[in-house]
């Protein structure tokens, strides 16, 4: 099976030597998405706005790979402050309705570019 590199202008470009996602067979593995504007104009302000932007970016990457948030099997949520869990959880629930994917959520010391939240996903191409 070959690996396909996924890239879309509808999500921020990678800020390092990695791809927005890779697709192998019918599986998509995304890199972590942070609250950057897709046009490269910088990070959106505030936890709530960052969380919404993260999930919009994640959705754009998945769509570029032929998948969607509905086909996500697993996410990992990284928080710069675990006390933000309830707020992030509420916004996350707006994007993953019905049968949500498996998920881990952890607090980390720092996130790229001072982000407050980052989300990565593993999804199926249906």
Image: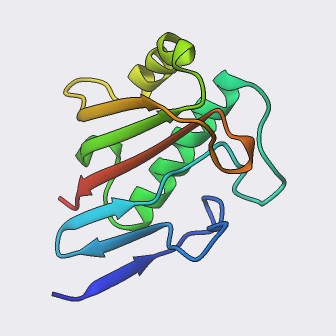
With respect to residue 54, does 93 lie above or below? above
Looking at the rendered structure, the number of numbered marks drawn on it comes to 0
In the rendered image, the residue lying farthest to the bottom is: 2
Residue shown at 17% from the left, 68% from the top: 26
Where on the picture, by quarter, is residue 94? top left
Residue 6, horizontal then vertical, whole percent: 44, 74
Residue 90, horizontal then vertical, whole percent: 46, 14
Residue 29, horizontal then vertical, whole percent: 32, 62
The colour scheme used here is: rainbow
Image quadrant occupied by the C terminus? bottom left
Residue 64, horizontal then vertical, whole percent: 44, 66
Q: Is residue 56 left or right of residue 21?
A: right
In the rendered image, the residue lying farthest to the right is: 41
The foreground one among 97 and 49 is 49
Residue shown at 66% from the left, 42% from the top: 35
Q: Is residue 9 left or right of residue 69?
A: right
């Amino acid at each position: 099976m070959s690996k396909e590199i996924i890239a879309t202008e509808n999500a921020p470009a990678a800020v390092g030597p990695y791809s927005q996602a890779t697709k192998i067979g019918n599986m998509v593995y995304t890199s972590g998405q942070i609250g950057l504007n897709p046009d490269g104009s910088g990070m959106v302000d505030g936890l709530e706005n960052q969380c919404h932007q993260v999930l919009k970016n994640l959705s754009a990457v998945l769509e570029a790979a032929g998948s969607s948030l509905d086909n996500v099997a697993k996410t990992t949520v990284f928080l710069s402050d675990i006390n933000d869990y309830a707020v992030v959880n509420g916004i996350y629930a707006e994007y993953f309705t019905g049968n949500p994917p498996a998920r881990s959520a952890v607090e980390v010391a720092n996130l790229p570019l001072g982000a407050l939240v980052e989300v990565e996903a593993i999804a199926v191409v249906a």
